[in-house]
């Protein structure tokens, strides 16, 4: 992986300023009122980070994406890992490759096509387009955004299932701010991998992680660096999923889960009062 000095790119890890609202959901942001007490923006299902704030996380995520596009994908060691785990980097896409974050953005459908669709093993990208016999009309493209957007989840998923989601590799792919930018997503994807292994056999799991356009996963590795806290958290969420299958949610949820939910609401209410 590139040296730490090469990885440092402070301009790609913006932090909120004193004038930035700590929580846009409560300070008149564009999605004001979208979160209620049951689904606050300060929690992410499937993670152990109880202090997660989506509006503080997002700039860090964008910093990881910019670093990935501007530096990591052009590094020989990152290209070697990508070749071994059989996933194309944006600069290697056969159609409209993305060489940097300042390149005009492609459409989401185009990005999914280059990434092999929705990850279900199909060679054709998923599309909501209605199939008709009518000739297609020419559509004037909308002005491109200033920042090329490439989803990082497919790369995180492939690193997780091949056992490469280790700190040096994540640092090489996503830069100095990877823990703040993609740490919660990595945690969710590790848990998803555990759930996938519990839900089906090897062939089923492999199919779920194969991607189209020849980007099938070459091998699956058991989850690396697992701690007992991670297993216990996964067990708890798996029990909640089983309860959902039996409709044991809301007023039918197990008593222990209802008590924990009320306790969490009380803590969040106290935190909200502390910000006012």
Image (cartoon, rainbow, N blue to C red):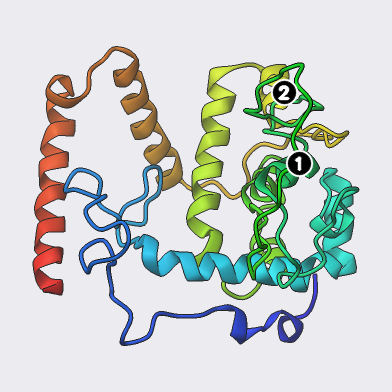
Q: What element carries label 2?
A: helix
Q: Which mark is residue 88?
A: none
Classify residue 22 as left or right of residue 156: left
Residue at 31%, 86% in the rendered image: 19
Classify residue 72 as left or right of residue 33: right
Q: How many marks?
A: 2
Q: How crowded is mark 2: few (under 14 residues within 10 Å), some or many (20 or more)?
A: some
Residue at 17%, 26% in the rendered image: 250
Q: Nearer the viewer, residue 15 or 111?
A: 111
- Label 1, label 2: how far apart the Cα atoms are: 36 Å
Q: Position of residue 190 (x, y in %)?
A: 55, 42
Write down the residue under mark 2: 207
Q: Is mark 1 on a helix, strand or loop?
A: loop
Indicate the quadrant where residue 160 lies: top right
**Where is the C terminus found, in terms of image quarters?**
bottom left
Name above or below for residue 87 compared with residue 18: above
Q: Residue 138 carries which label?
A: 1
Indicate the quadrant where residue 102 lies: bottom right
Say which label, 1 or 2, has the lower sequence index.
1
Q: Position of residue 230 (x, y in %)?
A: 44, 44
């Amino acid at each position: 992986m590139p040296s730490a000095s090469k990885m440092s790119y402070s301009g790609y890890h913006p932090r909120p300023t004193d004038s930035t609202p700590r929580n846009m959901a409560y300070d008149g942001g564009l999605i004001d009122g979208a979160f209620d007490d049951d689904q606050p923006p300060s929690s992410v299902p499937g993670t152990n980070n109880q202090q997660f704030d989506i509006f503080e996380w997002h700039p860090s995520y964008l910093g990881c994406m910019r670093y990935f596009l501007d530096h990591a994908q052009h590094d020989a060691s990152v290209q070697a890992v990508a070749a071994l785990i059989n996933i194309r980097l944006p600069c290697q896409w056969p159609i409209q490759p993305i060489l940097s974050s300042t390149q005009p953005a492609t459409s989401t459908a185009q990005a999914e096509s280059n990434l092999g669709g929705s990850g279900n093993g199909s060679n054709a990208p998923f599309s909501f387009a209605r199939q008709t016999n009518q000739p297609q009309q020419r559509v004037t493209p909308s002005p491109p955004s200033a920042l090329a957007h490439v989803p990082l989840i497919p790369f995180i998923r492939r690193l997780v299932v091949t056992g490469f989601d280790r700190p040096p590799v994540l640092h090489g792919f996503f830069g100095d701010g990877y823990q703040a930018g993609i740490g919660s997503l990595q945690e969710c994807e590790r848990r998803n991998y555990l759930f996938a292994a519990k839900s089906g056999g090897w062939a089923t799991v492999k199919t779920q992680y194969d991607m189209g356009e020849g980007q099938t996963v070459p091998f699956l590795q058991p989850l690396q660096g697992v701690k007992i806290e991670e297993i216990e958290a996964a067990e708890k969420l798996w029990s909640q999923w089983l309860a959902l299958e039996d409709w044991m949610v809301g007023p039918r949820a197990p008593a222990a889960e209802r008590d924990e939910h009320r306790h969490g609401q009380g803590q969040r209410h106290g935190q909200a009062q502390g910000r006012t």
